[in-house]
Every structure is written in C-alpha cells, then in structure tokens.
Image: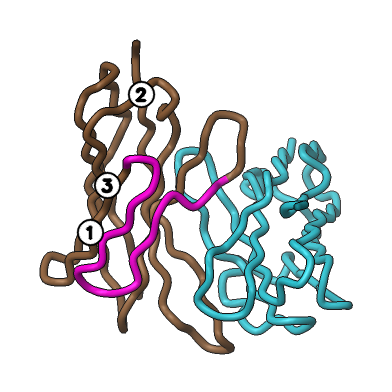
Chain colours: A cyan, B brown
Amino acid sequence: GAGVSQTPSNKVTEKGKYVELRCDPISGHTALYWYRQSLGQGPEFLIYFQGTGAADDSGLPNDRFFAVRPEGSVSTLKIQRTERGDSAVYLCASSPQGPNEQFFGPGTRLTVL
Amino acid sequence: GNSVTQMEGPVTLSEEAFLTINCTYTATGYPSLFWYVQYPGEGLQLLLKATKADDKGSNKGFEATYRKETTSFHLEKGSVQVSDSAVYFCALSTLGGGSNYKLTFGKGTLLTVNP
C-alpha cells in the first residue's frame, strides 16, 4: 500500500521567503507528526496532530512556524520569513491512534540561501 | 525531560563481524524503546522495538534488550552484511498530553560494512 508521501522532495528558497511543505499520511492514520532533522543530528519533534487538531505544538521553534491539518488527513507545515538556520530535512510521520509504530515519509530537504 | 545518548560514529566493520551500538536513555515515566534505520537514499524505518523492561526486540538478525536497571537498549548483530550499511537511530517515546507518543531520537550512528 501507499506509504507517507511528502512534497516537494527538495525546496530551495531565499532568506525571508515563505514556504509550505506538504505531508500525505497513510490512509486511516489519525496521528500525524512533524520532525526536523539537521545535519548530523537525529530528528527533533515539532508538532503532533490527533485528527484535525494540533494536540501538541511544543516543538515548534518560534511563531514563524505553523502547521495545519484541516480535514484530518493531509498536513501542511508553513514557515514564514525563512532564515538560514531553518535549513534541514523536514520529516512527517503517521500512525494509528495509540502507542504504535510511526511510519515516516522520505522528507523534504529545505535549503534557505 | 527525555533524552537518548547513542554511540558516536562512524563505525566501520568487515562483513561477518559482530556489531554493537550502545544506547542509553533518560525518561520520565515508562518509555517504549526503538531502533530506527535509514538506508542510503531512503526514509526512516522501524527496525525493532521493546515496550517494557526485559523485553527483547529482534528483526533481520538484529536484537536489543530493554534494560531498565542500566537504562540501556544496545543494538547487536552477530554477523553484519554489506547491506546493513546505514544510519541507525535509537529512540524512545512516552505518553504525553493529548495521546502524544512523540519520539525522542539519539544523534544516529553511521555504520559502514566492507566486503
């Protein structure tokens, strides 16, 4: 079956620009997570959705970052006024509700020039 | 808060050698423990997991035992293959607010197996 997909796979933007990163989870998975992976580091938690609502956004680094999941399926991570320090791979994962395996997408590599 | 410390890499082995990658953790509550693997050009995928003390997770010849007394979850394989070359991440999850099972990862260990 189809896994988690993320688009675009690569995004290059200029400092100060706005970007949107999309995640399409596995059908039927109610839990959706966003993580950020900087070079040489493990993924770090950003935000968690249970259904349509952001149940935990404690990992978002500042108010330039925002994410939505309006219909409880596809999610979009939005970054305003991008900075060079935002360059990283942004990972999305989904799982059925509860303490289940998280299935990861291939990631979006964001480069801010 | 939660944290995971895993063996610094890179690790380079010859085929059929024994592998150990150390992982220790700090957690509030009772964590579940995981090893994820990232093969070149691919996304993260679960390798094995253990959800309570003394559980042993195993998959593809890899094993790890949940040791509560030493807060460890070391990854082992008796005979590595070239195809095992990848980055390995140790991770934990505990239940947070709103049924959040977010993962906390270590920094990853790059394993290269030479023929």
Task: Say if the magenta span includes residue B57.
Answer: yes
Residue drawn at the location 28% of the way across and 49% of the way down: B63
Outermost residue to the top: B115
The image quarter in which residue A18 lies: bottom right
Compare marks 3 and 2 and give the one earlier in the sequence: 3
Crowd around label 2: few <14 · some 14–19 · many ≥20 (10 Å): some
Q: On the image, numbered disc 1 is attached to which residue?
A: B65
Magenta-span inclusion, residue B105:
no
Label 1 vs label 3: CA separation?
A: 8 Å
Q: What residue is drawn where x is 66% and y is 65%?
A: A94
**Image marks 2 and 1: residues in contact by CB distance under 8 Å:** no
The residue sitting at 34% across, 20% down in the picture is B113
Residue range of the region highlighted in magenta in the rendering: B44-61
The answer to which of A88 and B17 lies nearer the viewer is B17
Image side of residue A101 versus residue A71, left or right = left
Q: Are there few (<14), some (14-19), or many (20+) residues within 10 Å of tag 3?
A: many
Does B76 appear above or below A52? above
Which is in the foreground here, disc 3 or disc 2? Answer: 2
Q: Which mark is residue B81?
A: 2
Indicate the secondary structure of the residue bearing disc 2: loop
Badges 1 and 3: C-beta atoms under 8 Å apart?
Answer: no
Residue highlighted by disc 3: B75
Which secondary structure lies at badge 1?
Answer: strand
In this rendering, does residue B2 appear at all? no
Left or right of B67: which side holds A88?
right
The N terminus of chain B lies in quadrant: bottom left
Q: What is the three-letter code of the residue carrying label 2?
A: Gln
Which amino acid type is marked by label 3? Leu
